[in-house]
Amino acid sequence: MNIHDDYASWNNGKFLLANKKIEKLSSDYEVDLELDVNVLIPLIFGNYSATELCNMGLIKGDSQKIQILTENVQVKSGFFIDFF
């Protein structure tokens, strides 16, 4: 996947997400998905599925790869502790 970050250039690049590991790839590597770092965070934390983010127009790319990402990143319900 190709990640874009307008504020922290060191986050820009092409990455492979496989087997619960993330590997940075060389710039000449072909990628199937394009997204902003602000989209990656809710995806990884399970707030939204890849399919939901694609339907919102926030992930662009191959529909098969989006489906694989949806199947492999679990959506979780949020939890907020409201006592201090």
Image (cartoon, helix red, strand yellow):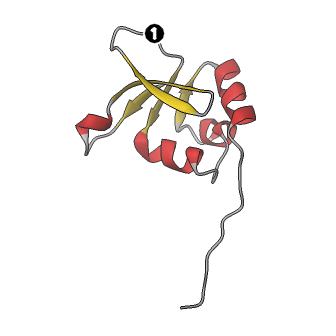
- According to the image, label 1 marks what residue? 30
Residue 42 percent location from the top left of the image = 55, 50
Q: Residue at x 71, y 55 (%)?
A: 76
Residue at x-position 33% and y-position 14%: 27
- As helix, strand or loop, the secondary structure at mark 1 comes to loop
Left or right of residue 68, residue 8 in this image:
left
Q: Nearer the viewer, residue 77 or 64?
A: 77
Horizontal side of 41 relative to 77 (left or right) equals left
**Above/below status of 52 relative to 2:** below
Residue 28 falls left or right of residue 77:
left
Q: How many marks?
A: 1
* Figure quadrant of residue 18: top right
Residue at 64% from the left image edge and 50% from the top image edge: 46
Residue type, numbered disc 1: Glu
- The single residue placed furthest to the right in the displayed view is 71
Location of residue 39 with respect to 62 vertically, above or below: below
Question: In the image, what residue occupies the spot 25% across and 43% down?
Answer: 8
Other-residue count near label 1 (Cα within 10 Å), few / some / many at <14 / 14–19 / ≥20: few
How far from the left and from the top, in percent, is residue 20?
Answer: 60, 34
